[in-house]
Amino acid sequence: MSTTIENKVWTIPEVLALPDDGRERWLIRGELRQHEEPAMTRRNRWHSQVLVAIAAALKNWRDGLPEPRGQVLGGEAGCILQHDPETMVGIDVAYFSPEVSEADMGETTLMDGAPLLAVEILSPSDTQGDIDEKVDAYLDAGVKLIWIVDPHLQTVLTIRPEAPPRLFNNLETIADEPCLPGFQCLVSHFFE
């Protein structure tokens, strides 16, 4: 469960200056959110296994693209989605376009710009409100494709701007997404 911390407008430098106490924090339109408990107490091997499988499938697909290829990141990849108001999140797995990947990031380790694909893998500590808020932030920032991955039900819900969501089960193939040309993978491979 997440909570809003201190009723004020936060900046990305202020959030980055907070102590590294293991809590997952994100910034939505200048409002700081954090999980009640440190994130590592909630993670589990199934979440990690799914994260690696999805990142590997995306990286294999990306490696087959002509240059410039963009970048696949995983493991709560830090991303500045917007600057005014400031929105910063950690994304389980993301694919960034070559343009965003090659931009000068200055002093920060964060990606500055919206990914083409943002993947959220459901964890026991996630609430529907947390997921809805991140999805809304992704859509507001111009993310073209969002996957909500449920390791328990072995499903992937795909969300695109101005299109109805589509649910894929573990017998189906996610293929030929508009922002992932040529990508296809059996959903079941994400859960092996």
Image (tube, rainbow, N blue to C red):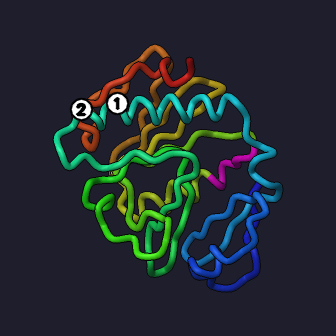
* Residue 106, image quadrant: bottom left
Q: Is residue 159 left or right of residue 45?
A: left
Residue 60 numbered tag: 1
Cα–Cα span, label 2 and label 1? 7 Å
Image coords of residue 186 (percent x, y): 41, 19
Q: Which residue matches tag 2? A: 64
Residue appearing at x 42%, y 58% in the figure? 139
Q: Is residue 78 left or right of residue 94?
A: right
Which amino acid, by three-letter code, is at mark 1? Answer: Asn
Which amino acid, by three-letter code, is at mark 2? Answer: Gly
Image coords of residue 45 (percent x, y): 70, 30
- The residue carrying pointer 1 sits among few (fewer than 14), some (14 to 19) or many (20 or more) residues within 10 Å by Cα, namely few
Q: Nearer the viewer, residue 84 or 46?
A: 46
Q: Are marks 2 and 1 in contact (CB under 8 Å)?
A: yes
Residue appearing at x 65%, y 34% in the figure? 47
Q: Nearer the viewer, residue 178 or 163?
A: 178
* Residue 21, image quadrant: bottom right
Report the span colored magenta: 125-130
- The residue carrying pointer 2 sits among few (fewer than 14), some (14 to 19) or many (20 or more) residues within 10 Å by Cα, namely few
Residue appearing at x 26%, y 54% in the figure? 98
Which quadrant, please, contains the N terminus?
bottom right
Q: Is residue 150 above or below residue 93?
A: above
Can you name the residue that lies furthest to the top here? 171
Q: For numbered disc 2, what is the local secondary structure? A: loop
Residue appearing at x 54%, y 75% in the figure? 29
Can you name the residue that lies furthest to the bottom here? 8
Can you name the residue that lies furthest to the front here? 107
Q: For numbered disc 1, what is the local secondary structure? A: helix
Image coords of residue 140 (percent x, y): 42, 64
Residue 32 numbered tag: none
